[in-house]
Amino acid sequence: MIKKLKSKRVFLRSINDSDSEKILELRSDISVNKFIDRAVMKNIDESVEFIRMIMKGNESSESYYWVISKNDVDSAIGTICLWNFNEDRTTAEIGFELLPAFQGFGYVSESIDLVLDFAFNELNLKQITAWAHHENSSSIKVLQKKGFHFDGEKTVDGTTVESITYSTYSITRDQLKQFPK
């Protein structure tokens, strides 16, 4: 089990089988998937399979994947994770997504604060990276608000005809200390 994290309004907890409907809703939503290069989830079986894969990653500390919920309700409103660790486990990538009805209220921002604190102070990571589609202004805005610095753009050739350009961002422990919340 991964550590539970809590702020004034959000609670980050391990994913479990009871999240299958919300994970399906999240990963099949067209607006959520608009800026993510992944297949849209089609059914509850895919959701359960995904959850089991994530649970294995959490158990082995290969990744840290939390469900975001509001403090007053246990139901998932989104997810946030640390994954894609480098070989010496000093750098990881952060990723997050939120159901559209909960976007724009600061839930992701609070969740990022919790995960950065965990990453730098408990895992002793030196740097966190993030990728945001260059047109995903909401994600870019929250990353910049949290002190992430623009590192450049990278084009990824996917299975589609078009290439996708992502903006890359990063933050170090020292940069976070200098950045006001």
Image (cartoon, rainbow, N blue to C red):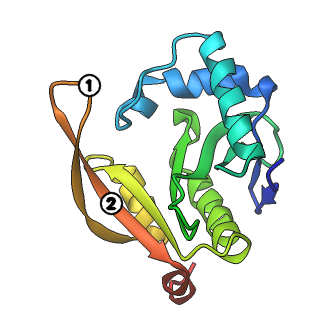
Q: In which quarter of the image is residue 109?
A: bottom right
Q: Position of residue 131 (x, y in %)?
A: 38, 54
Mark 1 and mark 2: span between their CA atoms? 21 Å
| Residue at the (65%, 62%) spot, across then down | 115
Q: Is residue 151 above or below residue 102?
A: below
Name the residue: 56% across, 34% down: 99
Q: Is residue 18 visible?
A: yes
Taking the spot 46% from the left edge, 74% from the top edge, the residue there is 171
Mark earlier in primary sequence (1, 2): 1
Percent coordinates x, y for residue 138 in the rendering = 39, 51
How would you rate the neighbour count of disc 1 (Cα within 10 Å): few for under 14, some for 14-19, many for 20 or more? few
Q: What residue type is labelled 2?
A: Thr
Q: Quadrant of residue 38?
A: top left
How crowded pointer 2 is (Cα within 10 Å; few <14, some 14-19, many 20+) is rated as some
Tell me where residue 33 appears, x and y as whole percent.
42, 30
Query: Does the rendering let one see residue 147?
Result: no
The C terminus lies in quadrant? bottom right
Q: In this view, does 130 lie to the left or right of 176?
A: left
Identify residue type, mark 1.
Answer: Thr
Q: Quadrant of residue 32?
A: top left
Q: Is residue 73 above or below residue 147?
A: above
In the picture, measured across the screen, residue 145 lies left or right of residue 163, that is right
Looking at the picture, how far across and down is residue 26, in whole percent? Answer: 56, 28
Q: Nearer the viewer, residue 107 or 67?
A: 67
Marking on residue 159? 1
User: Which numbered disc covers residue 168?
Assistant: 2
Q: Is residue 100 left or right of residue 11?
A: left
Where 119 sits versus 36, above or below? below
User: Which element type, helix, strand or loop, lies under badge 2?
Assistant: strand
Q: In this view, does 19 lie to the left or right of 101?
A: right
Relative to the observer, which residue lies in front, 145 or 163? 163
Seen at 15% across and 31% down, the residue is 162
